[in-house]
Image: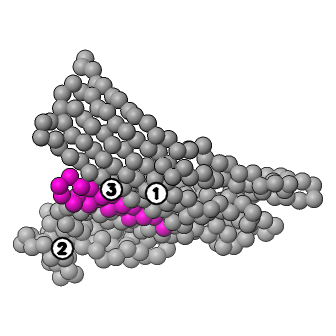
């Protein structure tokens, strides 16, 4: 599973630090398409006839009946995954264990195996699990999709306010928040040395409950959490007849607008931005050296990374990444 790119409220406990007997250890049960289950069934080799069609419910039932006692250990993780994929709210580890009449330690072990195989993702902050899919629908195309629905409680937020007494920053108990969305990655091998990488992220994050007296409001968006992130990167690799190779790559990235402060001060709204980079590298057939040309932020975008309304003025934290162009030479020496 790819490393998450979304910005979530940095609070909550880590599930992996708790023992499996902990009843309030919660699992994120994001709804996913049945295609997720179809891929799991395929990996489990339920389609023994070698066909490439999508597995059906009959295939799953047949596979279960064929396994018998000798391979029954494959049954429970499939049922756990199906349970996670068709829920829209968190469920405790104890409740899932009760659902399948299994011990908490057994369910925990299967969840960790599903995480390692990339079908379930455990959030590093909250310990919640996400359902995802990763595979090759075509020989030239790799796809990865993650659906998440995470709930946070007992959040803290640093809130800046301007009052008659002046500007102050305090840490508030923000209450509860939720974040749901998706992350999609694609890698296409188009032939003749052409590649195309794409990723799209969508994150709808809101505060769902705030403490009395807080400057935060329900439906405020956590700070520095863009709703959309997009990247695309075409690449071309050319093998030269005399040896050596040339690699050409361009990268485009986009980040939508986001809030600069947790209390969503309109003066601290951060605008969207995009960046374009390129890299061209020649690799010599012998001698262990390369020569390249590169460009970073080629359109010279000057964008804001953070904003803070301090009363008399709005503090803008600007990125220092101005346009940069250059040549690069590398040499590898044998030991």
Q: Is residue 46 left or right of residue 146?
A: left
Name the residue at 28% across, 74% down.
35
Name the residue at 60% across, 43% down.
320
Q: Residue 15 versus residue 132: which sits nearer the camera?
A: 132
Q: Is residue 235 left or right of residue 259?
A: left
Is 133 colored magenta in this rendering?
no
Residue with the mark numbered 1: 253
Disc 2 from disc 3: Cα separation:
43 Å
Residue 183, percent from left and from top: 42, 64
Q: In this view, does 57 lie to the left or right of 322?
A: left
Residue 51, percent from left and from top: 9, 73
Disc number lying in front (2 or 1): 1
Q: Residue 64 carries which label?
A: 2
* Crowd rating for badge 2 (residues with CA inside 10 Å; few <14, some 14–19, many 20+): some
Residue 100, percent from left and from top: 34, 71
| Pointers 2 and 1 in contact (C-beta within 8 Å) | no
Q: In which quarter of the image is the C terminus?
A: top left
Query: Which element type, helix, strand or loop, lies under badge 1?
Result: strand
Query: Which element type, helix, strand or loop, lies under badge 3?
Result: strand
Magenta-drawn segment = 183-202
Name the residue at 30% across, 25% down.
331
- Mark 2 vs 3, N-terminal side: 2
Taking the image as drawn, is residue 168 in sight? yes
Q: Residue 30 carries which label?
A: none
In the picture as drawn, the residue positioned furthest to the right comes out as 164
- Mark 2 vs 1, N-terminal side: 2
In the picture as drawn, the residue positioned furthest to the bottom comes out as 58
Q: In this view, does 238 lie above or below 24?
A: above
Residue with the mark numbered 3: 234
């Amino acid at each position: 599973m790819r490393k998450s790119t979304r910005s979530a409220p940095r609070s909550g406990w880590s599930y992996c630090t708790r023992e499996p007997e902990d009843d309030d250890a919660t699992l994120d049960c994001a709804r996913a398409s049945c295609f997720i289950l179809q891929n799991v069934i395929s990996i489990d080799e339920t389609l023994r006839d070698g066909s490439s069609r999508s597995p059906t419910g009959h295939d799953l039932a047949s596979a279960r009946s064929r396994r018998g006692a000798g391979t029954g250990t494959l049954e429970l993780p499939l049922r756990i995954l199906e349970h996670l994929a068709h829920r829209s709210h968190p469920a405790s580890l104890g409740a899932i264990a009760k659902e399948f009449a299994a011990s908490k330690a057994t369910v925990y072990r299967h969840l960790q195996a599903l995480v390692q195989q990339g079908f379930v993702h455990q959030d590093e902050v909250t310990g919640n699990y996400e359902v995802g899919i990763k595979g090759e629908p075509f020989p030239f195309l790799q796809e990865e999709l993650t659906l998440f629905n995470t709930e946070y409680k007992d959040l803290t937020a640093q809130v800046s306010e301007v009052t008659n007494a002046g500007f102050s920053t305090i840490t508030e108990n923000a209450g509860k928040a939720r974040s749901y969305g998706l992350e999609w990655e694609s890698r296409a091998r188009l032939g003749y040395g052409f590649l195309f990488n794409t990723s799209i992220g969508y994150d709808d994050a809101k505060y769902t409950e705030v403490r009395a007296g807080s400057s935060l409001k329900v439906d405020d968006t956590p700070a520095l959490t863009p709703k959309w992130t997009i990247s695309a990167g075409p690449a071309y690799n050319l093998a030269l007849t005399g040896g050596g190779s040339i690699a050409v790559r361009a990268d485009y990235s986009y980040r939508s607008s986001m809030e600069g402060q947790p209390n969503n001060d309109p003066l601290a709204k951060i605008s969207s931005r995009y960046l374009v980079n390129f890299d061209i590298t020649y690799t010599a057939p012998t001698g262990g050296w390369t020569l390249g040309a590169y460009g970073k932020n080629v359109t010279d975008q000057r964008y804001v990374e953070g904003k803070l309304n301090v009363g008399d003025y709005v503090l803008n934290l600007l990125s220092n990444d101005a346009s940069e162009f250059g040549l690069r030479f590398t040499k590898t020496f044998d030991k």
